[in-house]
Image (tube, grey):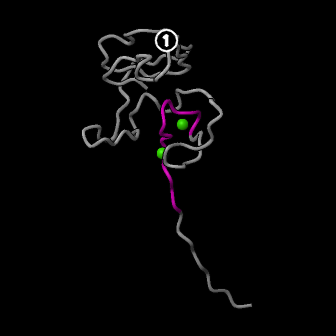
C-alpha cells in the first residue's frame, strides 16, 4: 500500500521490487528513484481510509478501498494476529479489516 509517498526501491531496501497488489493514493508519482519496480495486476487507485494516520494508526476502516481487493500472498494472519482473509477476500496491506460480532451467551434454566 503506497499512500502519500511513491514506491521506491530505496524504501523497500532492494534494487528490484515486484508489487502484486497495491493501493495507490495521493502520491503524485507512483514510483521514483533507482532500480526497478514492477507493478502487479491489482492496482487500486482510491482512498485507503486509514483510521488515524496522524497518530500512526494505519488500520483500515469500513470505507477503505483496500478491503477485499488484495491477493492471496500465503499470509494467514494480519498485523493484529487477526485471521485473514475475512469477508470476501484478502485486504491489501498489513491489516485485515473485519467486524467481530460477539453474541451473548443465553443460559436457560431447565429442570429435568
Ligand atoms: Ca477482507
Ligand atoms: Ca486487523
* Badge 1 element: strand
Image point (50%, 53%), residue name: 100
Give the answer, above or below, for where 69 lies relative to 81: above
Give the quarter of the figure containing the C terminus: bottom right
Read off the magenta span: 87-102
**Is 23 left, or right, of 20 in this rendering?**
left
**Is 47 left, or right, of 96 in this rendering?**
left
Image point (59%, 79%), residue name: 107
**Is 62 left, or right, of 106 in this rendering?**
left
Q: Nearer the viewer, residue 74 or 69?
A: 74
Q: Main secondary structure of the magenta part?
A: loop
Image point (54%, 49%), residue name: 81
Pointer 1: what residue? Answer: 37
Tell me where residue 102 appears, x and y as whole percent: 51, 61
Image point (59%, 33%), residue name: 89
Give the answer, above or below, for where 58 lies relative to 13: below
Amino acid at each position: 500500500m503506497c499512500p502519500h509517498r511513491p514506491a521506491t526501491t530505496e524504501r523497500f531496501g532492494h534494487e528490484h521490487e515486484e508489487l502484486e497488489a497495491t493501493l495507490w493514493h495521493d502520491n503524485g508519482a507512483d514510483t521514483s528513484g533507482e532500480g526497478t519496480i514492477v507493478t502487479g495486476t491489482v492496482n487500486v487507485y482510491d482512498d485507503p481510509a486509514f483510521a488515524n494516520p496522524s497518530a500512526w494508526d494505519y488500520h483500515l476502516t469500513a470505507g477503505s478501498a483496500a478491503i477485499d481487493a488484495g491477493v492471496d500472498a500465503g499470509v494467514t494472519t494480519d498485523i493484529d494476529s487477526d485471521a485473514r482473509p475475512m469477508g470476501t477476500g484478502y485486504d491489501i496491506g498489513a491489516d485485515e479489516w473485519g467486524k467481530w460480532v460477539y453474541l451473548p451467551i443465553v443460559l436457560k434454566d431447565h429442570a429435568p
